[in-house]
Amino acid sequence: MLIKIYGSAIHGVAAQTITIEVNIDTGGVGYHLVGLPDNAIKESSYRISAALKNVGYKIPGKKITINMAPADLRKEGSAYDLSIAIGILAASDQIFAEKVCDYIIMGELSLDGSLQPIRGVLPIAIQAREEGFKGIILPLQNAREAAIVNDLDVYGVENIKEVIDFFNEGKPIEKIILDTRKEFQEKINEFPFDFSEVKGQETAKRAMEVAAAGGHNIILIGPPGSGKTMLAKRVPGILPPLTLKEALETTKIHSVAGKMGAEASLMTVRPFRSPHHTISDVALVGGGSYPQPGEISLAHNGVLFLDEMPEFKRTVLEVMRQPLEDREVTISRARFTVNYPASFMLVASMNPSPSGFFPDDPNNTSSAYEMQRYMNRLSGPLLDRIDIHIEVQKVEFEQLSEKRKGEKSEVIRERVLKARDIQNERYKTLNISCNAQIGPKELEAFCELDETSFSLIKRAMEKLNLSARAYDRILKVARTIADLEGSEKILSHHISEAIQYRSLDREFWNA
Protein backbone atom coordinates (compact mmCIF):
# COMPACT_ATOMS: atom_id res chain seq x y z
CA MET A 1 0.00 0.00 0.00
CA LEU A 2 1.23 3.51 -0.86
CA ILE A 3 0.76 6.43 1.54
CA LYS A 4 1.84 10.06 1.19
CA ILE A 5 2.84 12.12 4.23
CA TYR A 6 3.93 15.76 4.12
CA GLY A 7 6.93 17.31 5.84
CA SER A 8 9.05 20.38 5.11
CA ALA A 9 12.67 21.29 4.34
CA ILE A 10 14.42 24.59 5.09
CA HIS A 11 16.20 26.46 2.31
CA GLY A 12 17.76 29.69 3.52
CA VAL A 13 15.03 31.28 5.66
CA ALA A 14 12.18 29.77 3.63
CA ALA A 15 10.58 26.33 3.70
CA GLN A 16 9.73 23.85 0.93
CA THR A 17 7.13 21.13 1.31
CA ILE A 18 8.49 17.59 1.10
CA THR A 19 6.30 14.66 0.06
CA ILE A 20 7.25 11.47 1.91
CA GLU A 21 5.97 8.45 -0.04
CA VAL A 22 5.87 5.18 1.90
CA ASN A 23 5.25 1.98 -0.03
CA ILE A 24 5.01 -1.48 1.59
CA ASP A 25 4.80 -4.73 -0.37
CA THR A 26 5.29 -8.41 0.35
CA GLY A 27 8.01 -9.01 -2.24
CA GLY A 28 10.83 -9.44 0.26
CA VAL A 29 12.12 -7.81 3.44
CA GLY A 30 14.07 -4.56 3.62
CA TYR A 31 14.11 -0.86 4.49
CA HIS A 32 15.02 1.44 1.59
CA LEU A 33 15.21 5.21 2.08
CA VAL A 34 15.79 7.35 -1.05
CA GLY A 35 15.59 11.01 -2.03
CA LEU A 36 19.00 12.37 -0.95
CA PRO A 37 18.64 11.92 2.83
CA ASP A 38 21.61 12.74 5.09
CA ASN A 39 22.98 10.43 7.80
CA ALA A 40 20.60 11.72 10.47
CA ILE A 41 17.63 10.67 8.32
CA LYS A 42 19.22 7.33 7.38
CA GLU A 43 19.62 6.54 11.09
CA SER A 44 15.94 7.29 11.70
CA SER A 45 14.98 3.64 11.18
CA TYR A 46 16.59 2.72 14.51
CA ARG A 47 14.83 5.53 16.40
CA ILE A 48 11.50 4.77 14.71
CA SER A 49 11.73 1.02 15.39
CA ALA A 50 12.42 1.50 19.11
CA ALA A 51 9.82 4.27 19.50
CA LEU A 52 7.04 2.25 17.84
CA LYS A 53 7.88 -0.85 19.88
CA ASN A 54 7.70 1.16 23.11
CA VAL A 55 4.19 2.46 22.32
CA GLY A 56 2.78 -0.91 21.22
CA TYR A 57 3.39 -0.90 17.44
CA LYS A 58 6.12 -2.21 15.14
CA ILE A 59 7.80 -1.85 11.77
CA PRO A 60 6.38 -4.66 9.58
CA GLY A 61 8.78 -7.33 8.34
CA LYS A 62 8.18 -6.49 4.69
CA LYS A 63 9.82 -4.49 1.93
CA ILE A 64 9.51 -0.82 2.89
CA THR A 65 10.45 1.84 0.33
CA ILE A 66 10.44 5.48 1.40
CA ASN A 67 10.94 8.26 -1.13
CA MET A 68 11.41 11.90 -0.12
CA ALA A 69 10.34 14.09 -3.04
CA PRO A 70 11.60 16.18 -4.71
CA ALA A 71 14.34 13.56 -4.93
CA ASP A 72 17.03 15.98 -6.17
CA LEU A 73 16.84 18.24 -3.09
CA ARG A 74 19.08 17.20 -0.19
CA LYS A 75 17.17 16.55 3.06
CA GLU A 76 18.90 16.91 6.40
CA GLY A 77 18.21 16.59 10.11
CA SER A 78 16.16 14.35 12.36
CA ALA A 79 12.88 16.29 12.03
CA TYR A 80 11.38 13.71 9.63
CA ASP A 81 11.25 10.89 12.23
CA LEU A 82 7.60 11.47 13.13
CA SER A 83 6.35 11.82 9.55
CA ILE A 84 8.19 8.66 8.40
CA ALA A 85 6.89 6.69 11.41
CA ILE A 86 3.27 7.75 10.81
CA GLY A 87 3.70 6.92 7.11
CA ILE A 88 4.92 3.40 7.92
CA LEU A 89 2.00 2.79 10.30
CA ALA A 90 -0.53 4.09 7.77
CA ALA A 91 0.95 2.14 4.83
CA SER A 92 0.91 -1.10 6.87
CA ASP A 93 -2.75 -0.53 7.93
CA GLN A 94 -1.82 -0.30 11.60
CA ILE A 95 -3.60 3.06 11.83
CA PHE A 96 -6.41 4.82 9.96
CA ALA A 97 -4.86 7.30 7.48
CA GLU A 98 -7.66 9.16 5.71
CA LYS A 99 -6.79 12.63 7.12
CA VAL A 100 -2.99 12.30 7.20
CA CYS A 101 -2.52 14.31 4.00
CA ASP A 102 -4.25 17.39 5.53
CA TYR A 103 -1.32 18.09 7.86
CA ILE A 104 2.38 18.87 7.86
CA ILE A 105 3.87 16.40 10.36
CA MET A 106 7.36 17.02 11.80
CA GLY A 107 9.28 15.95 14.89
CA GLU A 108 12.34 14.08 16.18
CA LEU A 109 11.62 10.82 18.00
CA SER A 110 13.25 9.59 21.18
CA LEU A 111 13.48 5.84 21.74
CA ASP A 112 10.56 5.91 24.19
CA GLY A 113 8.27 7.59 21.65
CA SER A 114 8.51 11.11 23.07
CA LEU A 115 9.27 14.04 20.77
CA GLN A 116 12.25 16.38 20.75
CA PRO A 117 12.07 19.99 19.43
CA ILE A 118 13.13 20.83 15.88
CA ARG A 119 14.44 23.99 14.19
CA GLY A 120 12.90 26.17 11.47
CA VAL A 121 9.31 25.83 12.72
CA LEU A 122 8.13 29.36 11.84
CA PRO A 123 8.99 29.24 8.10
CA ILE A 124 7.52 25.70 8.00
CA ALA A 125 4.24 26.95 9.47
CA ILE A 126 4.11 29.95 7.10
CA GLN A 127 4.64 27.65 4.09
CA ALA A 128 1.98 25.22 5.36
CA ARG A 129 -0.59 28.01 5.52
CA GLU A 130 0.34 29.31 2.06
CA GLU A 131 -0.11 25.84 0.54
CA GLY A 132 -3.52 25.36 2.15
CA PHE A 133 -2.79 22.65 4.72
CA LYS A 134 -5.38 22.37 7.48
CA GLY A 135 -2.81 22.23 10.25
CA ILE A 136 0.63 21.28 11.49
CA ILE A 137 1.58 18.59 14.04
CA LEU A 138 4.90 19.06 15.79
CA PRO A 139 6.63 18.77 19.20
CA LEU A 140 4.95 20.67 22.03
CA GLN A 141 8.12 22.74 22.68
CA ASN A 142 7.80 24.26 19.19
CA ALA A 143 4.04 24.81 19.23
CA ARG A 144 4.03 28.41 20.50
CA GLU A 145 6.44 29.43 17.75
CA ALA A 146 4.21 27.90 15.05
CA ALA A 147 1.07 29.42 16.64
CA ILE A 148 2.31 32.88 15.59
CA VAL A 149 0.91 32.02 12.13
CA ASN A 150 -2.79 32.81 11.80
CA ASP A 151 -5.38 30.61 10.02
CA LEU A 152 -3.47 27.39 10.72
CA ASP A 153 -4.36 24.72 13.28
CA VAL A 154 -1.29 24.03 15.43
CA TYR A 155 -1.10 20.82 17.47
CA GLY A 156 1.74 20.36 19.94
CA VAL A 157 2.33 16.76 21.01
CA GLU A 158 4.65 15.16 23.55
CA ASN A 159 4.50 11.55 22.34
CA ILE A 160 3.89 9.72 19.05
CA LYS A 161 1.01 7.87 20.76
CA GLU A 162 -0.97 11.13 20.81
CA VAL A 163 -0.60 11.44 17.02
CA ILE A 164 -1.57 7.79 16.47
CA ASP A 165 -4.71 8.20 18.61
CA PHE A 166 -5.56 11.47 16.83
CA PHE A 167 -5.70 9.76 13.42
CA ASN A 168 -6.76 6.29 14.50
CA GLU A 169 -9.43 7.03 17.11
CA GLY A 170 -10.21 10.70 16.51
CA LYS A 171 -8.91 11.51 20.00
CA PRO A 172 -8.54 15.30 20.06
CA ILE A 173 -5.24 17.11 20.62
CA GLU A 174 -5.48 20.54 22.20
CA LYS A 175 -4.90 23.32 19.69
CA ILE A 176 -2.27 25.91 20.58
CA ILE A 177 -3.77 29.38 20.19
CA LEU A 178 -1.65 32.50 20.61
CA ASP A 179 -2.68 36.17 20.49
CA THR A 180 0.36 37.33 18.56
CA ARG A 181 -0.29 41.07 18.78
CA LYS A 182 -1.02 40.97 22.51
CA GLU A 183 2.14 38.98 23.28
CA PHE A 184 4.15 41.27 21.01
CA GLN A 185 2.93 44.44 22.74
CA GLU A 186 3.42 43.04 26.25
CA LYS A 187 7.13 42.33 25.82
CA ILE A 188 8.16 45.03 23.38
CA ASN A 189 9.76 47.29 26.02
CA GLU A 190 11.63 44.73 28.11
CA PHE A 191 15.32 45.72 28.32
CA PRO A 192 17.86 44.50 30.90
CA PHE A 193 20.15 47.56 30.63
CA ASP A 194 19.59 51.33 30.91
CA PHE A 195 21.72 54.34 29.96
CA SER A 196 21.05 55.91 33.38
CA GLU A 197 23.52 53.37 34.80
CA VAL A 198 26.41 54.83 32.75
CA LYS A 199 28.46 57.40 34.68
CA GLY A 200 29.77 60.35 32.69
CA GLN A 201 30.55 59.78 28.96
CA GLU A 202 28.05 62.42 27.80
CA THR A 203 29.83 62.83 24.44
CA ALA A 204 29.75 59.08 23.80
CA LYS A 205 26.08 58.93 24.81
CA ARG A 206 25.30 61.67 22.32
CA ALA A 207 27.14 59.76 19.58
CA MET A 208 25.17 56.59 20.45
CA GLU A 209 21.93 58.56 20.22
CA VAL A 210 22.86 59.89 16.77
CA ALA A 211 23.85 56.38 15.64
CA ALA A 212 20.55 54.91 16.87
CA ALA A 213 18.49 57.71 15.31
CA GLY A 214 19.96 57.15 11.85
CA GLY A 215 20.87 53.43 12.04
CA HIS A 216 24.56 54.35 11.64
CA ASN A 217 27.50 52.03 12.30
CA ILE A 218 29.72 53.26 15.14
CA ILE A 219 33.13 52.44 16.61
CA LEU A 220 34.13 53.38 20.18
CA ILE A 221 37.83 54.08 20.82
CA GLY A 222 39.04 54.29 24.39
CA PRO A 223 41.19 52.78 27.15
CA PRO A 224 40.18 49.63 29.06
CA GLY A 225 37.49 50.23 31.69
CA SER A 226 36.16 53.43 30.12
CA GLY A 227 32.69 51.93 29.50
CA LYS A 228 32.75 50.95 25.81
CA THR A 229 31.05 47.57 26.33
CA MET A 230 28.63 49.08 28.84
CA LEU A 231 27.53 51.68 26.28
CA ALA A 232 27.19 49.10 23.49
CA LYS A 233 24.95 46.79 25.53
CA ARG A 234 22.49 49.63 26.05
CA VAL A 235 22.00 50.47 22.37
CA PRO A 236 18.99 48.11 21.83
CA GLY A 237 17.16 50.01 24.60
CA ILE A 238 17.18 53.27 22.60
CA LEU A 239 16.46 51.80 19.16
CA PRO A 240 12.88 51.99 17.84
CA PRO A 241 10.78 48.94 18.80
CA LEU A 242 10.49 46.14 16.26
CA THR A 243 7.50 46.28 13.97
CA LEU A 244 5.48 43.06 13.70
CA LYS A 245 6.93 42.47 10.23
CA GLU A 246 10.51 42.92 11.50
CA ALA A 247 9.77 40.63 14.46
CA LEU A 248 8.60 37.86 12.11
CA GLU A 249 11.70 38.27 9.90
CA THR A 250 14.01 38.11 12.91
CA THR A 251 12.19 35.14 14.44
CA LYS A 252 12.43 33.19 11.17
CA ILE A 253 16.23 33.54 11.11
CA HIS A 254 16.64 32.50 14.75
CA SER A 255 14.22 29.62 14.21
CA VAL A 256 16.21 28.29 11.24
CA ALA A 257 19.42 28.56 13.28
CA GLY A 258 17.84 26.72 16.23
CA LYS A 259 18.35 29.69 18.59
CA MET A 260 14.75 30.15 19.76
CA GLY A 261 14.80 27.98 22.87
CA ALA A 262 12.02 25.89 24.38
CA GLU A 263 8.54 27.42 24.69
CA ALA A 264 9.65 30.51 22.71
CA SER A 265 7.26 32.27 20.35
CA LEU A 266 7.87 35.68 18.77
CA MET A 267 11.03 37.75 19.23
CA THR A 268 9.92 41.12 20.55
CA VAL A 269 13.26 42.86 21.25
CA ARG A 270 15.95 43.71 18.72
CA PRO A 271 18.73 41.09 18.84
CA PHE A 272 22.14 41.93 20.32
CA ARG A 273 24.91 39.61 19.12
CA SER A 274 28.44 39.79 20.53
CA PRO A 275 30.69 37.11 18.97
CA HIS A 276 34.13 36.35 20.44
CA HIS A 277 37.16 37.61 18.50
CA THR A 278 38.23 34.01 17.69
CA ILE A 279 35.16 33.56 15.46
CA SER A 280 35.74 32.22 11.91
CA ASP A 281 34.58 34.02 8.77
CA VAL A 282 32.00 31.27 8.07
CA ALA A 283 30.55 31.55 11.58
CA LEU A 284 30.28 35.33 11.16
CA VAL A 285 28.68 35.59 7.71
CA GLY A 286 27.09 32.13 7.50
CA GLY A 287 27.75 29.08 5.34
CA GLY A 288 29.15 25.61 5.91
CA SER A 289 28.54 22.34 4.07
CA TYR A 290 24.84 22.75 4.84
CA PRO A 291 24.54 26.56 4.98
CA GLN A 292 23.33 28.10 8.22
CA PRO A 293 22.85 31.79 9.14
CA GLY A 294 25.91 33.48 10.64
CA GLU A 295 26.17 36.09 13.38
CA ILE A 296 25.48 38.98 11.00
CA SER A 297 22.16 37.39 10.01
CA LEU A 298 21.29 36.58 13.63
CA ALA A 299 21.82 40.31 14.28
CA HIS A 300 19.33 41.22 11.49
CA ASN A 301 17.15 44.17 12.60
CA GLY A 302 19.37 44.50 15.67
CA VAL A 303 22.93 45.16 16.81
CA LEU A 304 26.18 43.33 16.06
CA PHE A 305 28.81 44.21 18.67
CA LEU A 306 32.46 43.48 17.89
CA ASP A 307 34.41 44.02 21.12
CA GLU A 308 38.13 44.75 20.61
CA MET A 309 37.71 44.86 16.85
CA PRO A 310 41.44 44.82 15.93
CA GLU A 311 41.77 41.43 17.67
CA PHE A 312 39.48 39.81 15.07
CA LYS A 313 41.22 38.11 12.17
CA ARG A 314 41.68 40.36 9.15
CA THR A 315 39.82 37.93 6.86
CA VAL A 316 36.84 37.85 9.25
CA LEU A 317 36.51 41.63 9.23
CA GLU A 318 36.92 41.96 5.47
CA VAL A 319 34.09 39.53 4.66
CA MET A 320 31.73 42.00 6.36
CA ARG A 321 32.36 44.71 3.81
CA GLN A 322 29.80 43.50 1.26
CA PRO A 323 27.01 42.71 3.78
CA LEU A 324 27.47 46.16 5.38
CA GLU A 325 26.70 47.74 1.99
CA ASP A 326 24.06 45.36 0.59
CA ARG A 327 22.39 44.40 3.92
CA GLU A 328 22.22 40.77 2.86
CA VAL A 329 24.70 37.94 2.41
CA THR A 330 24.74 35.41 -0.42
CA ILE A 331 26.11 31.90 0.19
CA SER A 332 26.93 30.18 -3.10
CA ARG A 333 27.49 26.47 -3.62
CA ALA A 334 27.88 24.41 -6.81
CA ARG A 335 24.22 23.33 -6.89
CA PHE A 336 22.41 26.14 -5.08
CA THR A 337 22.56 29.67 -3.71
CA VAL A 338 21.14 30.87 -0.40
CA ASN A 339 20.42 34.47 0.61
CA TYR A 340 20.27 35.52 4.25
CA PRO A 341 19.17 39.02 5.32
CA ALA A 342 21.81 40.97 7.25
CA SER A 343 20.47 44.47 7.94
CA PHE A 344 22.20 45.21 11.23
CA MET A 345 23.72 48.14 13.09
CA LEU A 346 27.42 47.55 13.69
CA VAL A 347 28.79 48.70 17.05
CA ALA A 348 32.51 48.09 17.48
CA SER A 349 35.06 48.97 20.13
CA MET A 350 38.84 49.14 20.25
CA ASN A 351 41.73 50.36 22.36
CA PRO A 352 43.71 53.33 21.03
CA SER A 353 46.97 51.35 21.16
CA PRO A 354 48.28 47.83 21.91
CA SER A 355 48.80 48.81 25.58
CA GLY A 356 45.34 50.34 25.66
CA PHE A 357 46.23 53.70 27.22
CA PHE A 358 47.65 55.86 24.38
CA PRO A 359 48.16 58.85 24.52
CA ASP A 360 48.02 58.72 28.35
CA ASP A 361 50.36 55.73 28.70
CA PRO A 362 52.60 56.57 31.69
CA ASN A 363 55.25 54.04 30.64
CA ASN A 364 55.06 54.81 26.89
CA THR A 365 55.14 51.06 26.15
CA SER A 366 53.88 51.40 22.55
CA SER A 367 56.35 52.49 19.89
CA ALA A 368 55.27 54.40 16.78
CA TYR A 369 55.75 51.23 14.70
CA GLU A 370 53.60 49.16 17.07
CA MET A 371 50.92 51.86 17.00
CA GLN A 372 50.88 51.91 13.20
CA ARG A 373 50.80 48.12 13.02
CA TYR A 374 47.91 48.00 15.49
CA MET A 375 45.86 50.57 13.58
CA ASN A 376 46.55 48.82 10.27
CA ARG A 377 44.60 45.79 11.46
CA LEU A 378 41.52 47.73 10.40
CA SER A 379 41.50 48.40 6.67
CA GLY A 380 40.55 51.76 5.21
CA PRO A 381 37.58 50.37 3.23
CA LEU A 382 36.13 48.83 6.39
CA LEU A 383 36.56 52.03 8.44
CA ASP A 384 34.91 53.99 5.61
CA ARG A 385 31.81 51.87 6.14
CA ILE A 386 31.63 52.91 9.81
CA ASP A 387 29.85 56.27 9.93
CA ILE A 388 30.78 57.38 13.44
CA HIS A 389 34.18 57.12 15.19
CA ILE A 390 33.99 58.38 18.77
CA GLU A 391 36.65 58.65 21.46
CA VAL A 392 35.60 57.37 24.88
CA GLN A 393 37.61 59.08 27.59
CA LYS A 394 38.63 57.65 30.96
CA VAL A 395 35.96 58.27 33.62
CA GLU A 396 37.22 60.42 36.50
CA PHE A 397 36.58 59.52 40.15
CA GLU A 398 34.23 62.48 40.69
CA GLN A 399 31.94 61.18 37.93
CA LEU A 400 32.08 57.59 39.18
CA SER A 401 31.18 58.54 42.76
CA GLU A 402 28.37 60.90 41.74
CA LYS A 403 24.98 59.85 43.15
CA ARG A 404 22.90 61.57 40.48
CA LYS A 405 21.54 59.20 37.82
CA GLY A 406 22.06 59.91 34.15
CA GLU A 407 19.39 60.30 31.49
CA LYS A 408 17.21 57.19 31.13
CA SER A 409 17.11 55.12 27.95
CA GLU A 410 13.37 55.79 27.72
CA VAL A 411 13.95 59.55 27.35
CA ILE A 412 16.67 59.07 24.72
CA ARG A 413 14.47 56.60 22.90
CA GLU A 414 11.67 59.18 22.57
CA ARG A 415 14.03 61.55 20.73
CA VAL A 416 15.25 58.70 18.53
CA LEU A 417 11.66 57.75 17.69
CA LYS A 418 10.82 61.34 16.67
CA ALA A 419 13.84 61.40 14.35
CA ARG A 420 12.89 58.01 12.87
CA ASP A 421 9.31 59.23 12.30
CA ILE A 422 10.71 62.13 10.25
CA GLN A 423 12.81 59.67 8.22
CA ASN A 424 9.89 57.28 7.68
CA GLU A 425 7.79 60.15 6.34
CA ARG A 426 10.65 61.36 4.11
CA TYR A 427 11.35 57.94 2.60
CA LYS A 428 7.80 56.54 2.61
CA THR A 429 7.82 56.06 -1.18
CA LEU A 430 11.26 54.39 -1.11
CA ASN A 431 12.43 51.05 0.27
CA ILE A 432 14.45 52.83 2.99
CA SER A 433 13.88 52.94 6.73
CA CYS A 434 16.67 55.22 8.01
CA ASN A 435 19.34 57.71 6.91
CA ALA A 436 22.14 55.13 6.98
CA GLN A 437 20.51 53.29 4.06
CA ILE A 438 20.18 56.18 1.61
CA GLY A 439 22.06 56.08 -1.70
CA PRO A 440 23.59 58.73 -4.00
CA LYS A 441 20.21 59.84 -5.42
CA GLU A 442 18.71 60.33 -1.97
CA LEU A 443 21.84 62.15 -0.77
CA GLU A 444 21.47 64.63 -3.62
CA ALA A 445 17.76 65.08 -2.99
CA PHE A 446 17.65 65.26 0.81
CA CYS A 447 21.12 66.48 1.88
CA GLU A 448 21.46 69.87 0.21
CA LEU A 449 24.04 72.18 1.81
CA ASP A 450 24.12 75.95 2.11
CA GLU A 451 27.28 77.86 1.22
CA THR A 452 28.70 77.85 4.78
CA SER A 453 28.18 74.11 5.23
CA PHE A 454 29.62 73.37 1.79
CA SER A 455 32.76 75.40 2.55
CA LEU A 456 33.15 73.64 5.93
CA ILE A 457 32.97 70.11 4.53
CA LYS A 458 35.27 71.08 1.65
CA ARG A 459 37.99 72.15 4.11
CA ALA A 460 37.52 68.95 6.12
CA MET A 461 37.88 66.81 2.99
CA GLU A 462 41.13 68.54 2.03
CA LYS A 463 42.66 68.61 5.52
CA LEU A 464 41.73 65.05 6.57
CA ASN A 465 42.18 63.56 3.09
CA LEU A 466 38.76 61.88 3.31
CA SER A 467 37.48 59.41 0.71
CA ALA A 468 34.30 59.86 -1.31
CA ARG A 469 32.59 57.28 0.90
CA ALA A 470 33.60 59.21 4.05
CA TYR A 471 32.07 62.34 2.47
CA ASP A 472 28.78 60.47 1.99
CA ARG A 473 28.91 59.22 5.59
CA ILE A 474 29.38 62.75 6.95
CA LEU A 475 26.34 63.95 4.98
CA LYS A 476 24.21 61.04 6.25
CA VAL A 477 25.22 61.65 9.88
CA ALA A 478 24.58 65.40 9.48
CA ARG A 479 21.14 64.60 8.09
CA THR A 480 20.42 62.53 11.22
CA ILE A 481 21.65 65.28 13.57
CA ALA A 482 19.34 67.71 11.76
CA ASP A 483 16.43 65.26 12.16
CA LEU A 484 17.10 65.01 15.92
CA GLU A 485 16.77 68.80 16.06
CA GLY A 486 13.69 68.74 13.86
CA SER A 487 15.49 70.86 11.24
CA GLU A 488 14.45 70.47 7.61
CA LYS A 489 17.79 71.80 6.35
CA ILE A 490 21.32 70.67 7.16
CA LEU A 491 23.12 73.59 8.82
CA SER A 492 26.81 74.24 9.41
CA HIS A 493 26.75 73.09 13.05
CA HIS A 494 25.22 69.76 11.94
CA ILE A 495 28.10 69.29 9.49
CA SER A 496 30.60 70.34 12.15
CA GLU A 497 29.33 67.73 14.63
CA ALA A 498 29.29 65.03 11.91
CA ILE A 499 32.95 65.80 11.07
CA GLN A 500 33.82 65.43 14.77
CA TYR A 501 32.64 61.82 14.45
CA ARG A 502 35.47 60.87 12.05
CA SER A 503 38.20 60.42 14.71
CA LEU A 504 40.12 57.71 12.87
CA ASP A 505 40.50 59.94 9.82
CA ARG A 506 42.54 62.44 11.84
CA GLU A 507 46.29 62.76 11.61
CA PHE A 508 46.54 62.03 15.37
CA TRP A 509 45.64 58.38 14.87
CA ASN A 510 48.08 57.84 12.03
CA ALA A 511 51.07 59.28 13.91
Image: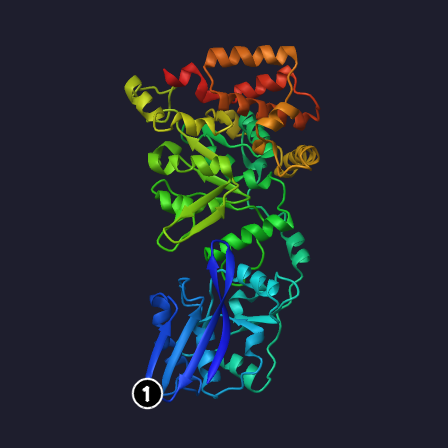
Three-letter code for the amino acid on which mark 1 is drawn: Gly
* Residue 436 image point, x, y percent: 57, 32
Looking at the image, which residue is at 63% across and 67% down?
Answer: 152
Total number of numbered labels?
1
Q: How is the image coloured?
A: rainbow
Compare residues 399 and 125 and report the one nearer the observer. Answer: 125
The secondary structure type at the circle numbered 1 is: loop
User: Is 262 above or below relative to 443?
Assistant: below
* Residue 150 image point, x, y percent: 65, 63
For residue 465, what is the image quadrant? top left
Q: Is there any visible trace of residue 404 in the rendered image?
A: no
Looking at the image, which residue is at 38% across and 54% down?
Answer: 335
User: Is 414 above or below relative to 468?
Assistant: below
Compare residues 6 and 363 and report the one nearer the observer. Answer: 6
User: Is 17 above or below relative to 324?
Assistant: below
Question: Counting other residues with Cα less than 10 Å from the Cα at mark 1, is it few (<14), some (14-19), or many (20 or more)?
Answer: few
* Residue 485 image point, x, y percent: 68, 25
- Tell me if 123 is positioned left or right of 417 in this view: left
Looking at the image, which residue is at 61% across and 62% down?
Answer: 130
Residue identified by numbered label 1: 28
User: Is 268 above or below relative to 51?
Assistant: above
* Residue 223 image point, x, y percent: 41, 27
- Tell me the quadrant of the picture where the C terminus can be found: top left
Looking at the image, which residue is at 53% across and 19% down?
Answer: 500
Compare residues 23 and 180 and report the one nearer the observer. Answer: 23
